[in-house]
Amino acid sequence: MRSASSFSLLLALLFATGCASVAEQPVGTASIPESPATAEEQRERAVQTAVQTAFGLEAALFSDAEAVSSREGVAAHFRRGFVHALAQDFADYYWQRGRVQTGPPTLLVPDVVTVLRASERSASAYFETPAALRATWDLPRYTLVEMEREGDRWLVAATAQQEHRPE
């Protein structure tokens, strides 16, 4: 038989992780499931995830730089989050003297991505430029990201920095 203290501990853990919502309800009531996300909400979440994924590709490249053996490999790596032209630019920047050149980061995953607009084929989003990048590269406070839909993927098509929050 388990003690009351272990049960209390279990309840505390459930409440801390948000798993105890049913336990909070009076007996005889049922939990009403959240309505499914609208197409617009799903699109916004997909854009947010795509921005964070794209901006994490540099760190992923650096963590396994020896696995990339060519400029084309670098381009293919960045193609997972960026349009063709930007992936080629990254390949030109990072592939030097026959290997991946590492250095101070130029991309960091943003904590919060705000979607300004999202249609079926394009989207605009922004995030606060991470402080480490602002300090290293003297960048303005916000990064604006233009996204394009390519097949079933959202890809970064352009970025711009600005001092004031985009609207």
Image (spheres, rainbow, N blue to C red):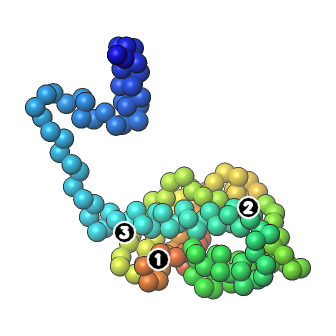
Q: Which residue is mark 2?
A: 63
User: Quick one: SS at disc 1?
Assistant: strand
Residue 110 percent coordinates (x, y): 57, 56
Q: Amino acid at mark 1?
A: Arg
Please determine whether, in this image, residue 97 is positioned above or below residue 24: below
Residue 73 percent coordinates (x, y): 71, 80
Q: Amino acid at mark 3?
A: Arg
Residue at 12% from the left image edge and 34% from the top image edge: 29
Residue at 48% from the left image edge and 63% from the top image edge: 49
**Mark 2–mark 1 CB contact (< 8 Å):** no
Front residue of 60 and 147: 60
Q: Earlier in the sequence, mark 2 or mark 1?
A: 2
User: Quick one: SS at disc 3?
Assistant: helix
Q: Which residue is mark 3?
A: 43
Q: Which residue is mark 1?
A: 153
Name the residue furthest front: 1
